[in-house]
Amino acid sequence: MKVSVQTGDFDTGLEIKNISKNSKIGAVASFVGLVRDVQMTLEHYPGMTERAIEKIVEEAKGRWRVMDCTVIHRYGVLQPNDQIVLVAVASAHRGDAFAACEFIMDYLKTQAPFWKKEQVAGGARWVEAKTADDEAAERWK
Amino acid sequence: MKVKVLYFASLREKIGKDAEEIELPAGVATVAALRRHLGGLGGVYENSFSTKILLRAAVNQDMVQPAAPINAGDEVAFFPPVTGG
C-alpha cells in the first residue's frame, strides 16, 4: 500500500507496474484525475491528508479484496492537463479492483482535506464543493 | 483550557492567519460550541463563522461532526467542504 501527497508529477505506468508484481493479482483498475482548462493551486492539510486517505483505503480493504493499492495526490500549482490524482487498485479479479478504485475516489472527493483555487480572468477563486460529489460518496453507505 | 485552531483555504484567507492558540471560556466543550465562540469574537470572525457558511471541522486530524467533544491541547481545524480529487 502506498499513499503519497506530493508536489511532483507521477508515472502512472510505473505505479501500476509496482503493484502488479504478485502473481495472485489478476486485475489492476486505475483512475487518473487531470486539471481541466485553467491553472490552479491545491492546498491541503499536511498530516491529516495522508491519514484521511489511509483511512479510506482501509475502509476499501474491509469491503473488497484489495491486494495492493497506490494513491497519489498532488498539491501546489498545477497547469491545465497536469495529472492531479492517481488511484490504482490491484486484486485477483476485476470486480473488486473496479469497485474499490471508484469507492476510494468517491470518498477522497468528500473526505480528504484538499481545496482547489482556480486562476480565472481577473483573479483567483476557490472551487465550491459539489453536491454530486456528496451523493457519489453517499451511495456506498 | 487552550486549543490550537487551524484555518484552511477561503476561511484562512478571510481570517488572515492559518493558526492560533485560543483560550476557551468554561462550557465550550464541543466543535459546535467552539464555532459559536469564534463567531462571537466579532470583526472578520463574525462573517467567517456565520451559520450561513458551510464549514467542516476536524479534531486532531480526524473529520468530525459538530457535536464532537474537544479537550485541552486539541488541534481543531475549520475549513470549507473539500474539493480535491
Image (tube, coloured by chain):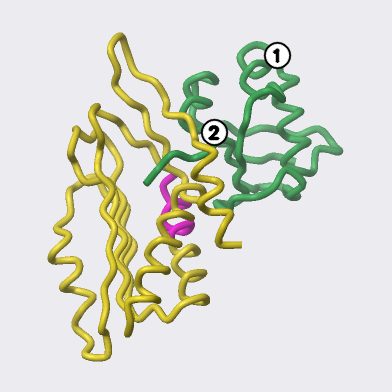
Give the colour in which the image draws chain B.
green
* Image location of residue B24, percent across then percent down: 75, 34
| Residue B42 tag number | 1
**A37 lies above or below A11:** above
Residue A49 inside the magenta-drawn segment: yes
| Chain shaded yellow | A
Q: Is residue B73 left or right of residue A66?
A: right
**Residue at left offset 42%, top offset 36%:** A115
Tell me residue A121's x, y (percent).
28, 12
Q: Of residues A104 and B29, which is closer to you in this image?
A: A104
Q: Which kind of residue does numbered mark 2 sit on?
A: Pro
Residue at image location 52% in from the left, 77% down from the top: A62
Q: Residue B40's spot in the image, x, y percent?
A: 75, 20
In the image, what residue occupies the spot 28% across and 48% down?
A33
At which x and y percent is residue B49?
66, 24
Q: Which residue is mark 2?
A: B80
Q: Quadrant of residue A28?
A: bottom left
Q: Chain letter for mark 1, please.
A: B
Look at the image and give the residue range highlighted in magenta: A45-53
Residue A87 vertical placement versus B21 (above, below): below
Horizontal side of B41 relative to A5 (left or right) equals: right
